[in-house]
Amino acid sequence: MANESDVIESLKQKEAELDELLNQAREKASQIKQDALIRAEEIKLSMLREIDKMAEEYKKGEMEKIDKEAEAIKQEALKKAQDLRRLAEERKEKAVEATVSYIIRG
């Protein structure tokens, strides 16, 4: 009988040890999961910062393009305005010449 109770006691002890190992494994798994979640969040934040930086650089590049296009349009408009002024002056001079000629011939 002593042998049988020793076996039972030994089995209970092994069961307790296995329960303890299982609890330790669960704690370790929980800690690994927590660490993985923290690391995933850090990676996510890092990627978001990188994406924000890339978006800002893209926006800056596009704004520079728009500024250049706007400057080109402005220069073209100034050139056209000068051409129109010159044409208006030429027509004004021709009109004055025609008027003077008409008056002189008159």
Image: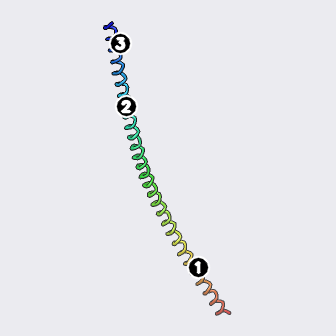
Of 59 and 93, nearer the camera is 59
Question: Whole-percent x and y of residue 48?
Answer: 43, 48
Question: Whole-percent x and y of residue 29?
Answer: 38, 31
Mark sitting on residue 8: 3
- Judging by the rendered image, the residue that carries numbered circle 1 is 88
Q: Secondary structure at mark 1?
A: helix
Q: Indicate the quadrant where residue 101 lies.
A: bottom right
Q: Is residue 65 above or below residue 98?
A: above
Question: Whole-percent x and y of residue 43?
Answer: 39, 43
* Between marks 2 and 3 in the image, the one whose residue lies nearer the viewer: 3
Q: Secondary structure at mark 3?
A: helix
97 to the left or right of 30: right
Residue visible at 38% across and 29% down in the picture? 26
Q: Is residue 34 above or below residue 99?
A: above
Q: Secondary structure at mark 2?
A: helix
Residue visible at 41% across and 43% down in the picture? 41
Mark sitting on residue 27: 2
Q: Amino acid at mark 2?
A: Glu
Question: What whole-number distance in Å separates the C-alpha atoms at marks 2 and 3?
Answer: 28 Å
Mark before the other along the chain sequence, 3 or 1: 3
Q: Quadrant of the C terminus?
A: bottom right
Residue visible at 39% across and 41% down in the picture? 38
